[in-house]
Image (cartoon, rainbow, N blue to C red):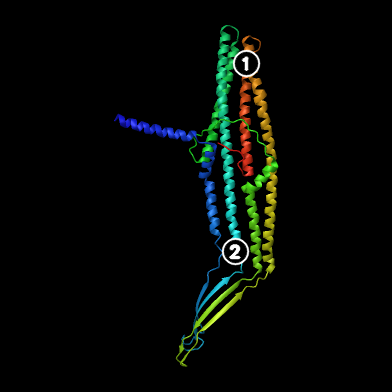
Amino acid sequence: MNSRLLMLLIIFLSFVGLQFGQEKNESLQDLITEATKVSPRIKMLQSKFDLAKSNIEIGTNLPDPVLTLGLVNMPTNSFSFTQEPMTGKIVGLSQAIPFPGALSSASNVKAVDTSIVGQETLDLQNKIREDVSDLYYSIQVIREEIKLSRESIQLLNQISNVVKRKYEVGNASLQNIIQVEVQITRVKDKLESLKGKERSAIAKLNALLLRRENSTILTGKITPIISYNVKSDSLLKIARLNRPLLQKIKFGELKAQFMKEQAEYSFYPNFKLGLQYSQRDYSAKTGTNFTDFLSVVVGVTIPINYGGNKTEKVNKAIHLQSFYNNQYNSALQDLQHSFGNINGKISELENREILITKSLLPQAEQSYKASIADYQVGKIDFVNVIKAENDILNIKTELAKVRVDYSKSISQLEYLSGKQLTSIE
């Protein structure tokens, strides 16, 4: 019995260890991959792709031939096949034949739809990457704020102990003790608010992963900024080659070009080829075996452009080409504007991180140490100590936000350019 319990315990611990190991090793890239894999919108586009692929063959092949069966010159007084020499049974077969190249032109128009849906899928995957990254980085900064708030509470508790000792010897007032307790309460209130934001962000991310809303999401530490410098013109070139949205517009323009070619085929005639075999019976009246007949018929449509309807089909395709071309140029203009804004923000965040780490944070820490020392000897009021401690908390929080905003900005550039610019773990 003991050996069985021991075995079950080992299995259970192994399973828990495996689960913990999987959670621990789950990176941002793993989350992006999973969100892409389970996305219902991706699966919807995959079905749309299959639909577009199946639609290529519809109406792009020869129509079915027509089989004709009938009677010709049947006498109504007797309905006899042998009374009149012109009476016969006919079997006909006809086939409509579009002008050479018309069917392949129609096939080209429909085939482009698969490429358009393919680019829609890639763009959605690109958007999912940005959405998951944005939520992941948001969770990171919230957790860093939670960590800093807890550290602040510990620090305030230490300050409270100092104040209480000074109060016991008559060197501090009761008001000082109340002030530090109020500050601790404020930080605790902020901590509860941050926990709520954390739960909300985790629930949103789990929704993208199709997990339970309270499933654990592990995040790494916020990393310092690594200087990144890609000019807007270079990003625009990258986007021309990699952004699925731009490729989709280009495929739309290509489809319009194929539609123009298809419309031009309406000015050419279509054909119809028919074969008809007439079988005649032996005539008892004349004692003659009548010869069977074989007929061949060729029909040609006359492409009359009534009311300019065929011309307008061509014009419509030309206007559609112009629309997609202008849409492409407009999208490039929007991208250039966005790249300029984001690069400006990135430069600002790089400079702010240097200023905070090299100047603001060291100065705030020195100010706090000095205020503690001065307060202990009665040179300054207790309010200055609280302010110095709060300054440190605010500066460290701002540093975390700066670094996370930087990561989010890079993620936005990757989405807009359609290419992963940095490695993520």
Residue neighbourhood size for the residue with mark 1, other residues' Cα within 10 Å, grouped as few (<14), some (14–19), many (≥20): some
Tally of numbered tags:
2
Q: Residue at x 63, y 37 (%)?
A: 410
Q: Are marks 2 and 1 in contact (CB under 8 Å)?
A: no
Which of disc 1 and disc 2 is earlier in sequence? 2
- In what element is the residue under mark 1? helix
Q: Which residue is mark 2?
A: 104
In the image, 217 versus 80, the foreground residue is 217
Q: Residue at x 61, y 71 (%)?
A: 270
Task: Name the quadrant of the C terminus.
Answer: top right
Instruction: Give the alpha-carbon distance from disc 2 to disc 1, as whole Å.
Output: 81 Å
Image coords of residue 151 (percent x, y):
56, 22
Q: Residue at x 61, y 59 (%)?
A: 109
Residue 33 in view of the camera = yes
In the image, 223 versus 291, the foreground residue is 223
Farthest residue in the bottom direction?
286
Q: Which residue is mark 1?
A: 369
Task: Name the quadrant of the N terminus.
Answer: top left
Image coords of residue 415 (percent x, y):
62, 42
> Which image quadrant for residue 251?
bottom right
Farthest residue in the left direction?
1
Q: Residue at x 63, y 28 (%)?
A: 399
Along the horizontal axis of the image, is 118 left or right of 337?
left
Amino acid type of disc 1? Lys
> Which image quadrant for residue 104?
bottom right
